[in-house]
Image (cartoon, rainbow, N blue to C red):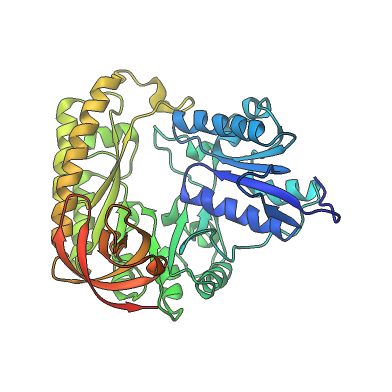
Amino acid sequence: MTVSTAAQKTCRLVTLGCKVNQYETQLVLETLEQNGFREAAEDEPADLCVVNTCTVTNNGDSRSRQVIRQLARQNPGTRTLVMGCYATRDPQAVSTLPSVFEVVTNKRELPDILARHGIHDMPTGISRFEGRKRAYVKVQDGCILKCTYCIIPQVRPGLRSRSPDDIEDEVRRLIDNGHQEIILTGIHVGHFGVDTTRGRSGLPPFRLWNLFRRLDKIPGNWRMRLSSIEANEIDADFIAAAADCEHLCPQFHPALQSGSNTVLQRMRRRYTVERFLDTIEQMRSRLVNPAFTTDVIVGFPGETDAEFEETLDACRQARFMKIHIFPYSVRRGTPAASFPDQIHGTVRESRMQILERLERELAREYYATLVGTDVDVMVEGTLEHRPGWVQGTDRRYVPVEIPGEPVDVGRMIRGRGVRAVNHCLEAEREAMTK
């Protein structure tokens, strides 16, 4: 795989899964580019393919295998490097797939693995996020929790926080290169800084809220957003910083997973429903109409009708703006895989449909709170069915439709909410900032 000076090598990269994977793929792309590669055109075969896999569900595993096989068929003679959580969990199965020549079981070893094949000098961060105005910035890796349903701590063990200096330099580069929204992400974002200051005398703690206070000092017309955060990691310091930071979006994603205390105990989560709801109310008391989104797992082993009703009630009390709904997926190697009373698929599907209806109801109720208020919309695309209108998201991550033209895509538009409908907030256009 040594880079030829006679002809530029081509590459094709495919990402499955989370924001962290998307960030890591971008880092690999920029590494390849500075070593003489370029991305292959759509109808052009690639010399090298890179697949960043996911294993959070069974579907992630099967989709990863499917993509690897498709790339081998569509790129005759290619060599495929496979990385990511599925590669870590089952490297033997991955190694037997067509065209696979290298399986990365530990992403921290990726620079050394690439160097063995003539790809050197992996950068410490990215400078752009391909095809997007919104950019993800990975601030930490690893998870040390022991939730009974989750395989991720086994494939991304330990904690590893990035240097605040490297993070700030990266954010400044991305803003300078036109990215107006920066999303701080990681495998367990709330544990940022725990590994670098815990147990080290003389070093003051530098945690997530310290980080976004520091980044908030970067000038310019940009905004910062947090990815998922554990509710019990939202303390008084976090809330005070969130209220103070000008660039931080008032939208937060504490993962509920279940609204039943008995299910949370079986999941080995670290909070009660009462504590979760109290944390949300504390944030509402300090911030202006913050939006809360969440994750909920439906059909966890042993989930009774009454426990599911408790989840519905908790979602109503939390007044979530969006709920990411996941059917429970058995993950071999996790404690929950051997729990009794696995829920039948038809029951899971029925409960998901009920929760989806509630989510739509809660979303529209939240959208209605923004009618008559100013919204700053990051325009993400045009509306084919509605000429002269564009779509995007505001600071609270609410989907907004607003008058606009193709030239507005990638820009911030100032508007005012005029009507809440089932799928979005409709807004009238007031002004635009570049």
Q: Where's the N terminus, which quadrant?
A: top right
* Image-based side of 304 in relation to 242, left or right: left
Residue under the point 47% across and 51% down: 19
**Relative to 342, does residue 321 appear above or below in the rendering?**
below
Q: Where's the C terminus, which quadrant?
A: bottom left
- Residue 303 visible in rendering: no
Residue under the point 53% across and 75% down: 176
The image position of residue 165, as x and y in percent, is: 57, 71
- The one nearer the camera, 101 or 193, is 101
Residue under the point 39% across and 65% down: 406
**Relative to 253, does residue 359 appear above or below in the rendering?**
above
* Image-based side of 367 in relation to 79, left or right: left
Residue under the point 48% across and 44% down: 144
The image position of residue 417, as x and y in percent, is: 18, 67
Tell me how many marks there are. Answer: 0
- Residue 87 visible in rendering: yes
Q: Determine the residue located farthest toward the front in the rendered image.
A: 387
**Relative to 417, does residue 57 appear above or below in the rendering?**
above
The image position of residue 18, as x and y in percent, is: 46, 46
* Image-based side of 129 in relation to 287, left or right: right
Name which quarter of the figure residue 331 lies in. top left
Name which quarter of the figure residue 304 lies in. top left
The image position of residue 80, as x and y in percent, is: 69, 38
- The one nearer the camera, 314 or 64, is 64
- The one nearer the camera, 39 or 162, is 39
Q: Determine the residue located farthest toward the right in the rendered image.
A: 6
- The one nearer the camera, 49 or 302, is 49
